[in-house]
């Protein structure tokens, strides 16, 4: 009987330790990817705001602004790249600011708002065709673009925190090496170009097919 009690206590201890290890592991995973999780949450919030905004403020002028246009791949790429790269540069700039980390998630919120307005316009004005248009011409490129943005925010958040830490401990005692961050930024800049080209290509190829 005594041996059974001891065995029971050991099983309970082992189960408790296993549970604690799982909590620690989950905590590590969250800390590693929390900036990406926050990006997804703020984007979703912006998506909701954009959809609601279009619902309460739809006008002919707004519809004319949102109406898709069939442009050449080059023209579409240039215009999209300028917009996307501007947002990317803002995130990079915030990474080099001490106050960058708290406000950096404004960017995915803005992206969500714009995407929400565009998709709401299509759903309201073109019904089933608008759904198809969104699925083939908005969802694929926005998934790629948002992934690049999420990774850029992750890097900028880490850099901003490192700058705060270096400032508190003094630069002399805690030298900050920005070269690894710059290399990652350059790689992600290429990702921005790919996302812009992907949207331009989809728009050019699929616009004649999806007649709205």
Image (cartoon, rainbow, N blue to C red):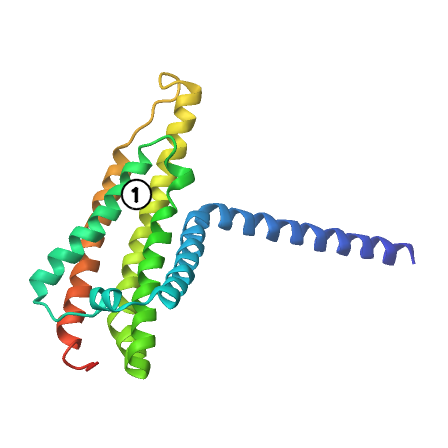
Foreground pick, 58 / 11: 58
State the residue in front, 65 or 91.
65
Mark 1 Cα shell of 10 Å, populated few (<14), some (14-19), many (≥20): many
Q: Position of residue 39 (x, y in %)?
A: 40, 52
What residue sits 31% from the left and 59% below the top?
114
* Residue 55 figure quarter: bottom left
Given the current orientation, which residue lies at the most extreme right position? Answer: 1
From the viewer's perspective, tell me whether residue 181 is left or right of residue 71. right
Q: Secondary structure at mark 1?
A: helix
Q: Position of residue 56 (x, y in %)?
A: 39, 65
Q: Quadrant of residue 183?
A: top left
Give me the residue at 14% from left, 56% from top.
79
Which part of the image, by quadrant, shows the N terminus? Answer: bottom right
The structure residue drawn at horizontal position 86% and vertical position 58%, both measured from the top left corner, is: 4
Q: Residue at x 27, y 37 (%)?
A: 93
Q: Which residue is mark 1?
A: 91
* Badge count: 1
Residue in front for this viewpoint, 122 or 206: 122
Where on the picture, by quarter, is residue 159? top left
Query: Is 137 left, or right, of 131 in this rendering?
Result: left
Which percent across, then down, holds residue 137? 24, 71
Instruction: Please tell me whether residue 155 is drawn above or below residue 73 in the rendered image.
Output: above
Residue 52: % across, % down: 41, 64
Whether residue 111 sits left or right of residue 22 in the image: it is left
Q: Which quarter of the rendered picture does the C terminus lie within?
A: bottom left
């Amino acid at each position: 009987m005594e041996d059974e009690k001891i065995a029971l206590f050991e099983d309970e201890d082992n189960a408790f330790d296993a549970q604690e290890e799982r909590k620690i592991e989950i905590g590590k995973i969250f800390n590693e990817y929390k900036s990406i999780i926050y990006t997804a949450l703020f984007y979703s919030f912006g998506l909701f705001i954009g959809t609601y905004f279009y619902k309460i403020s739809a006008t002919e002028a707004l519809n004319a602004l949102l109406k898709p246009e069939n442009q050449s791949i080059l023209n579409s790429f240039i215009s999209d790249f300028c917009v996307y790269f501007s947002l990317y540069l803002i995130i990079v700039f915030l990474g080099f600011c001490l106050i960058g980390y708290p406000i950096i998630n404004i960017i995915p919120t803005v992206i969500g708002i714009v995407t929400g307005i565009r998709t709401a316009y299509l759903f309201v004005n073109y019904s089933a065709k608008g759904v198809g248009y969104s699925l083939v011409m908005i969802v694929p490129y926005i998934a790629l673009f948002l992934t690049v943005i999420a990774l850029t925010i992750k890097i900028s958040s880490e850099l901003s925190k490192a700058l705060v830490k270096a400032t508190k401990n003094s630069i002399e005692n805690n030298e900050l090496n920005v070269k690894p961050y710059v290399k990652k930024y350059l790689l992600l800049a290429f990702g921005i170009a790919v996302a812009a080209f992907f949207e331009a290509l989809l728009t050019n190829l699929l616009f004649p097919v999806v007649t709205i």
